[in-house]
Image (cartoon, rainbow, N blue to C red):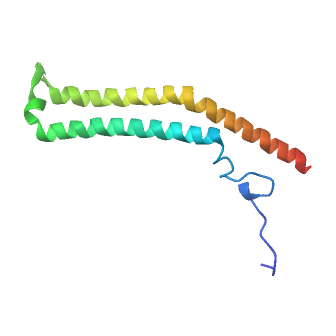
Amino acid sequence: MVWGARPARRGPEREGVAGPGHYAHDARFVLLRRRYARLAAGVALGFLGWYFGYVALSGFARGLMARKVAGNVNVALLLGLLQFVSTFALAGLYVGYARRRLDPLAARLRADAAAAAAEQAREQR
């Protein structure tokens, strides 16, 4: 490297281009992050609570889990199948909420960022 020479800047840290933290303080971005965090925490806690509850019942309430419901089908089998049903239900709820509440806000932020980048590019010419 030549003395005093600086490497060419690449990526979002170039002059005139907003860096990755540029929108971190935008109220819409904060709202988007908050909505996503609440959703992710709620879904994760709901699923893990239900899963660990099933595991705890399997380990400590064997009499309840062995109780026959119909023929050879017992409570453990039904609750195990409900694990699959609840997984798909939570995934569906997540997708529906994201489409209604997260995606439109993210699309507006992306559009604004693209418009700002285009404006900056016009100003640099």
Q: Residue at x 62, y 33 (%)?
A: 105
14 relative position to 37: left or right = right
Q: Residue at x 73, y 41 (%)?
A: 113
Q: Residue at x 77, y 52 (%)?
A: 17
Q: Residue at x 64, y 40 (%)?
A: 27
- Residue placed furthest toward the top: 70
33 relative position to 13: left or right = left
- Residue placed furthest toward the right: 125
The reply to whether residue 124 is visible in this rendering is yes
* Residue nearest the observer in this picture, 27 or 10: 27
* Residue nearest the observer in this picture, 81 or 29: 29
On screen, 121 above or below 103? below
14 relative position to 125: left or right = left
Where is residue 51 shown, x and y percent of the image?
Answer: 28, 37
- Residue placed furthest toward the bottom: 3
Q: How many marks?
A: 0
Where is residue 30 shown, x and y percent of the image?
Answer: 59, 42
The reply to whether residue 72 is visible in this rendering is no
Quarter-wise, where is residue 70 in the image?
top left
Image quadrant for the N terminus? bottom right
Quarter-wise, where is residue 54 in the image?
top left
Where is residue 37 shown, x and y percent of the image?
Answer: 48, 41
Where is residue 99 shown, x and y percent of the image?
Answer: 55, 27
21 relative position to 116: left or right = left
